[in-house]
Image (tube, rainbow, N blue to C red):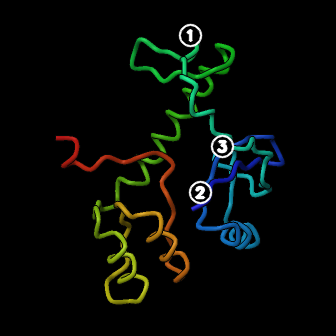
Amino acid sequence: MIVFDLKCEAHGHVFEAWFGSSADYDSQRARGLILCPICGDGSVAKAVMAPAVAAKGNRMAVPRPAETSGGDQPVVMGAPADQEKMRAMIHALAKAQEKVLENSTWVGRDFADQARAMHYGEQDRASIHGEVAPAEAKALMAEGVEVAPLPLPVISRRAKN
């Protein structure tokens, strides 16, 4: 799996998306399958990304005061207005994902097997969601099985108890 920062060219929205490979990104973009999650526009391109540089091994990480939180609210850097916008966007994204999953069945770790069975016509098509290792997700995509990662984590009912 590979993660890219993408930018909506029409409105400047920047978001993160996961793909099986660079070729998967290119293929999905060519087919018009990549849309801005904020405005739905299809004019999306890779954004400039900062390289992931590991810290020196002999340095102790010290959290900055602005990054620590005393409550359950996520900490968002930036101006207060930006923080409220970000919270509202994440809340809207969570509600949209919840709506999509309303008619979807949790299949847990059987996801790959059931997705393949549906793809090959061995099982009726249905909306499912579950768990799959990154390598298995990549294999599904390589086979042409239509799968997509959810933007936010889902906790199974068993794990909640």
Q: Quadrant of the C terminus?
A: top left
Q: Is disc 1 placed on a helix, strand or loop? A: helix
On the image, numbered disc 2 is attached to which residue? 18
**Distance Cα–Cα, label 3 vs label 2:** 16 Å
On the image, numbered disc 1 is attached to which residue? 65
Placement of 76 over or under 96, stated as above or below: above
Q: Is residue 27 left or right of residue 154?
A: right
Which amino acid type is marked by label 3? Ile
Circle on res. 159: none
Q: Residues within 10 Å of mark 2 (few under 14, many from 20)?
A: some
Q: Looking at the image, which residue sits at the far front?
A: 58
Which amino acid type is marked by label 1? Pro
Placement of 114 over or under 86, stated as above or below: below
Placement of 45 over or under 109, stated as above or below: above
Question: Which label's residue is closer to the chain start, 1 or 2?
Answer: 2
Is label 3 or label 2 in front?
Answer: 2
Q: Is disc 3 placed on a helix, strand or loop? A: loop
Question: Which label's residue is closer to the chain start, 3 or 2?
Answer: 2
User: Quadrant of the rendered structure where residue 49 is?
Assistant: top right
Q: Is disc 2 placed on a helix, strand or loop? A: strand
User: Residue 23 in the image: x percent, y percent?
Assistant: 70, 72
Which amino acid type is marked by label 2? Trp
Circle on res. 38: 3
**Distance Cα–Cα, label 1 vs label 3:** 30 Å
User: Residue 155 in the image: x percent, y percent?
Assistant: 31, 46
Q: Nearer the viewer, residue 22 or 107?
A: 22
Residue at the spot 53% in from the left edge and 34% down from the top edge: 90
The answer to whether mark 1 and mark 3 are in CB contact below 8 A is no
Q: Residues within 10 Å of mark 1 (few under 14, many from 20)?
A: few
**Distance Cα–Cα, label 1 vs label 2:** 31 Å
